Image (spheres, helix red, strand yellow):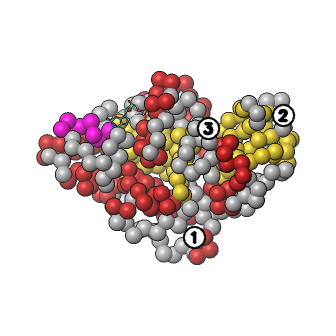
Amino acid sequence: VVSDSIPKQAEENLRSPICCIMGHVDTGKTKLLDCIRGTNVQEGEAGGITQQIGATYFPAENIRERTKELKADAKLNVPGLLVIDTPGHESFTNLRSRGSGLCDIAILVVDIMHGLEPQTIESLNLLRMRNTEFIVALNKVDRLYAWKAQRNAPIRKTLKQQSKDVQNEFDRRLIEVITQFKEQGLNTELYYKNKDMGETFNIVPTSAISGEGIPDLLLLLIQWSQKTMIEKLTFRNEVQCTVLEVKVIEGHGTTIDVVLVNGVLHEGDQIVVCGLQGPIVTTIRALLTPHPMKELRVKVWFCVLPFCRPFPFSLFFLCSSYVEYL
Ligand code: GDP
């Protein structure tokens, strides 16, 4: 579990890890996020493709609740987890690489029925290029023939209760995926059998339909972030902010969607952002953050305006923020 050697001060000053979901189209990235969040964005999308970068903030209490069946006496030192949902379609390579540059840790989704696919390998290469930690979600286990689903169960519990045939089929497909990763020069292993975390990447079997394995995935994301990137996650009071998108919202004017990784922004602060014709110097007119557990594409930011001043510190530096400028 989490190291006891973390200095007291660091524990109190940790920011939320930023996590992105990557993988081939149709592996279940959006559905996984929906499942964690308990909403249904995937079905509302045109053609089921995530067309823009969305993000969701999961507070630690929510993660604690979701993982309690695992009985891990893990201390959650981080205040939460911010998940960026990157698009999986081939034409969004640019956006996808943007997402991966921003994140501390990634979930690489692989469909257990299909194994590694072209964009899985592309995502893998992006992650390796940027030295980003990641966890493999081996998704759609419920599609194994004769699988008996148990809603939101930890994966070991549900695997134990499957028939011998299902377990054998699971093992066969798992080994196939591990072999495919090996062909890409990467060691992977089921997370609870992994004796060499750090060198060998973790695989968490999941089902975004039944929620099986989701508690395992959430807990591992938090534990692994806390274990390996304390320094990176220690909050610093210098502004580090990544722009995801610029758009015009009726009644609000030009807005930029940003993820504020470190530091504090205030209304009235002068900021400089890159423009096509050179630097844009402007003033922040309003800061808007989404509610926890709601995805940014869902139009919730209007109702959080009252939070803006004075800004709750914890909400502020951990959540994605909307910055509106003139
Ligand atoms: P994305 O393109 O990676 O975001 O994939 P989606 O989340 O849109 O999912 C693609 C399709 O696979 C949809 O029809 C989902 O309902 C389905 N799907 C996703 N996850 C699972 C799963 O765990 N089990 C099953 N049976 N279907 C899934």
Magenta stretch: includes residue 168: no
Residue 46 % position (x, y): 51, 24
Q: Residue at x 38, y 50 (%)?
A: 214
- Give the spatial CA distance, label 1 vs label 2: 40 Å
Q: Secondary structure at mark 2?
A: strand
Q: Is residue 263 left or right of residue 216?
A: right
Name the front one of labels 2 and 3. 3
Residue 234 % position (x, y): 62, 64
Q: Secondary structure at mark 1?
A: helix
Q: Secondary structure at mark 3?
A: loop
**Disc 2 designates what residue?**
278
Q: Identify the residue at the far left of this view.
A: 164
Q: Residue at x 80, y 40 (%)?
A: 325
**In the image, what residue type sits under mark 2?**
Gly
Residue 236 % position (x, y): 69, 62
Q: Where residue 299 is drawn, which disc sits there? A: 3
> Which portion, as a residue range, is magenta?
138-146
Q: Residue at x 58, y 75 (%)?
A: 7
Name the front one of labels 1 and 2. 1
Camera-side residue of 160 and 313: 313
**Disc 1 designates what residue?**
11
